[in-house]
Amino acid sequence: MDNISSTDESYDVGYGYQPSPSSVDDQSPTETTGLSTLSGNSFAYCRTNSETSAFSEHSDENSWSETGSPLSSRSLKSPTRAVLSRLGMRQHKTIADDPDTVDLELELMKERFSKLLLGEDMSGGGKGVATAVTISNSITNLYASVFGQHQRLEPLHPDKKIMWKREMNCLLSVCDYIVEFVSTSQMLQDGTTIEALTSRPRSDIHINLPALRKLDTMLLEILDSFEATEFWYAEKGSMSNNSTRAGSFRKIVQVQPQPQRKEEKWWLPVVCVPSGGITEKERKHLRHKRDCANQIHKAAMAINSSILAEMEIPESYMTSLPKSGKASVGDSMYRHMYSAEKFSPEQLLDSLNISSEHEALELADKVEASMYTWRRKSCLPQAKSSWIMVKDLVSDDRTDKNNVLAERAESLLYCLKQRYPELSQTTLDTSKIHFNRDVGKAILESYSRVLESLAFNVVAWIEDVLFVDKTMKSQEE
């Protein structure tokens, strides 16, 4: 215990976690200029929500310091000190030693541990959800509690930052015990070589978790860099027609000389800049941080997509698929996908004239369902005559109609998600998360999803400031 305690004291109080060998990764996303999006409702982009959290409780602004203050690692005695420091529950050194605070943190830890074991079923009747779903909901709700009301380009409140780091360290500590066994050769003192099983962090956690921690740290650093700015926010009110805000449905397009905002979000804080606009130094700083946040968003999205792709498809989803892929996508789209010699998904999307996020998500669900329908048909054994079987042997499998349609549906779905990167989760993704029983995948998926949401919002907030600055400069001219 003493070794654990002394080790924990060497780490920064703000981070409050003990990194494992799998948690070291200093590589950051490459800073390249990328197109960014217009802002809207910051919290609307959080792609899954749960009504119950096993680790996070919604509270007002004045209650953060009451239950969210970590304990001092120096003021605790073993074994209590080792347990709390392991979970990141450490108090600032300026706060006096208080046994009541120690008891409060211990009770809080017991409560959260009990909720996790009960699967969010407080009746204890065994009707709770799986552990993987509980942890996924906990990370989602923790993000909502900490960042749900943070809608400005400014540093996160210190108490909320401590709460985020402390509780995320507590949730992510589960990954320290998710291992896989590999066979290794060991030599004994007499020179005999034996084969032995040794444990190591599971490969997907070893690769992705350190990267997600790094992205998390970089996003908080981006927010901290806007402590002293040349712009500010008005508490209430709406902007003029020339500088209205964008909605949550943001399409990535080429930057126009005169950007247009379609939908106004009057309840969001309004960006204000000086009459002559911000300085070139401030503008350069904003663009640099926007590009960094944009790259973080792409990295988190890539990790999230890879984790979702590795999750098993629930049987309930497969049984709910339509019998015909044509019935799912419609006659006109089916003819375009089947008859075209050179299929162009971009051209097909342009002809559909998608005008809302709801239409884009509905199309994604239909295309994804038809894709798996055609894949299932291509794998089913069919009774064929001997002549047809001979022709199949000499022909390429790629010419099979169902295989071709499935590949074209996959390319169409990929282009749709590229065109609308903020698209909500499809029915299949939601079903995978709900029926997933792998705790490691649940943590990686939910962690990457909330970081993807935060990075997207940071880009949107920066775009807000740049848009208002450009509007003010054009008015001066």
Image (tube, helix red, strand yellow):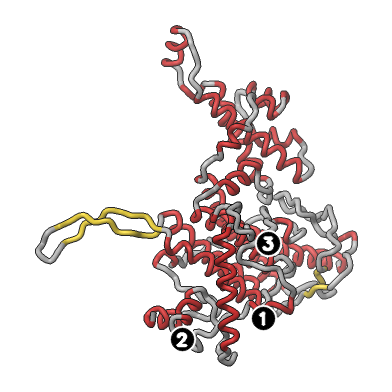
Assign a secondary structure to mark 2.
Answer: loop
Name the image quarter holding the C terminus. bottom right
Identity of the residue drawn at 53% across and 62% down = 212
Using the rendered image of the protein, determine whether residue 33 is visible from the camera's viewpoint: no
Tag 1: amino acid = Ser
Q: Which residue is mark 3?
A: 459
Q: Regarding mark 1 in the picture, which secondary structure is present there?
A: helix
Which quadrant does the N terminus fall into? bottom left
Amino acid tagged 3 = Val
Cα gap from disc 3 to disc 2, whole angstroms: 45 Å
Quarter of the view holding residue 415: top right
Q: Position of residue 366 (x, y in %)?
A: 68, 34
Residue annotated with mark 2: 77
For label 3, the SS is helix
Residue 188 lies in quadrant: bottom left
Name the residue tied to disc 1.
65
Residue 18: % across, % down: 45, 73
